[in-house]
Image: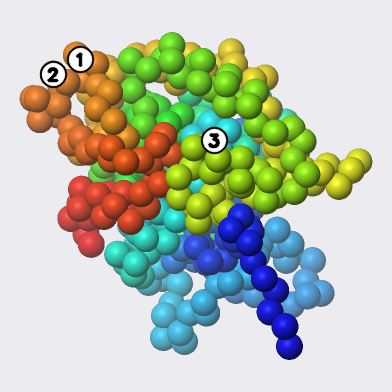
Amino acid sequence: MTTEKKGPFTPLEWTEFFETKRQITIPTALDSTEITFTLYEINGIRRKRRSSNSSSGNSNSSSSGYESDSESEKVKDKKDLPVILLHHGAGHCALSFAATARELHKLVGKRARILSYDVRGHGETTSKDQLNLNVERLAMDVRNVIWTLFGGSQDGQDSFPETATRTTTVHETKLPKLFLVGHSMGGSVVTEVVHQGLVPNVVGFSVLEMVEANKSRAHVAIRQWCESRPTPCKTVEEAIQWAVDADEVRNVESARVSFPGMVVRDPDSSSYLWRNDLLRSEQHWSSWFDGLNTKFLKSKTPPRQMIVSTSQLDNEMKAGYEQGIFQQLSFLEAGHAVQEDEPVEVAKALIAFVGKDLGL
């Protein structure tokens, strides 16, 4: 029996990092765009398997790679676990947090639920409004994902109260403790969630690589990033190699799991296309930066953290840091994708920052 030889840019399966992958559809009472998010989890709550001839089975749910719970572990023991929600940046996908999620799992074991989802217009998430990446829209998406997962039932399943509307607030007693982590655009989104008070029970939030002072440079960098990507890619390996060669991701292992989630086979050829056409959402880019400093510094959730690859704070943020309003950490050897380049250290920093508040 021969073993397939793997090259340096061979894609890695998501199952090496997460336990479950599934789709959740947001009820139309909350979102009329018919959006279905693709979600990756560790320590998530699984539905009981239905027989194959059941018409109520969920064909979107996948349990590949999931380690079966022991007979003694009940669903009710998981529904109250604190939740670490990981929100990726523009143009990327949920798997950009795969390496960090795996390291978080090593630190928390079965004591916390870790989840990351493909944002609207990214990865395998689908909707009627894929191009609306306005920060307020994306913040409502976070709220709706949490509502759908936790707000509608006592057992953590995907049921939903018929009386809920787009302005309904998630009832605090039905939510576990939440720690929100956002990279780049995602950092702006989680800040918006906390600033607007869209979700209760948030015990802290962390922003990775996102500061208001970088607005002008970021616009240029995003355009260059989009225009420099090989289009199309002959293979998935080519997309991974481009990410590494272009210094987009310095950790090859992370690139091998994250970038396959960013491309899709062209139905008309054997090549691969990028799932996200970020340039078509350019009108929304400014919303990620406008007023970010004020939202971050004056958020309703005091425990806040800023992780950057370099020291890039402006005077307003420096003053806030000196006043002890937030914690700042810098990883000088990392690039923009700090959670991919330094997953071990980022995971340690996140848990050291909020572990006590999560009850870990």
Give the label, 2 or 3, closer to the camera.
Answer: 3
Q: Nearer the viewer, residue 344 or 333?
A: 333
305 vs 93, left or right, is left
Q: SS class of the residue under badge 1?
A: helix
Nearer the observer, 251 or 92: 251
Task: State if disc 2 and disc 1 touch (CB < 8 Å).
Answer: yes
Q: Earlier in the sequence, mark 2 or mark 3?
A: 3
Task: Please report the residue visible at 18 percent of the width from the left and 55 percent of the height from the top.
Answer: 356
Residue 11, image quadrant? bottom right
Q: Amino acid at mark 3?
A: Ala
Q: Would you call the spot at circle 1 few (<14 residues within 10 Å), some (14-19), or many (20 or more)?
A: few
- Name above or below for residue 39 compared with residue 332: below
Tag 1 residue: 316
Q: Quadrant of residue 200?
A: top left
Tag 2: amino acid: Ala
Q: Where in the figure is residue 324, as x and y percent of width and height?
A: 10, 30
Residue 11 shown left or right of residue 220 in the figure? right
Quadrant in which the C terminus appears: bottom left
In depth, the one of 167 and 43 nearer the eye is 43
Indicate whether 99 appears above or below 222.
below
Q: Do the CB atoms of the residues marked 2 and 3 lie less than 8 Å apart? A: no
Give the labeled residue for mark 2.
319
Q: Nearer the viewer, residue 196 or 7?
A: 7
Q: Quadrant of the N terminus?
A: bottom right
Residue 12 position in % (x across, y down): 59, 61
Residue 325: image quadrant is top left
Taking the spot 43% from the left edge, 15% from the top edge, the residue there is 217
The residue singled out by tag 3 in the image is 246
Mark 3 nearby-residue class (10 Å; few <14, some 14–19, many ≥20): few
Q: Is the residue 139 above or below the residue 155 in the image?
A: above
Q: Residues within 10 Å of mark 2 (few under 14, many from 20)?
A: few
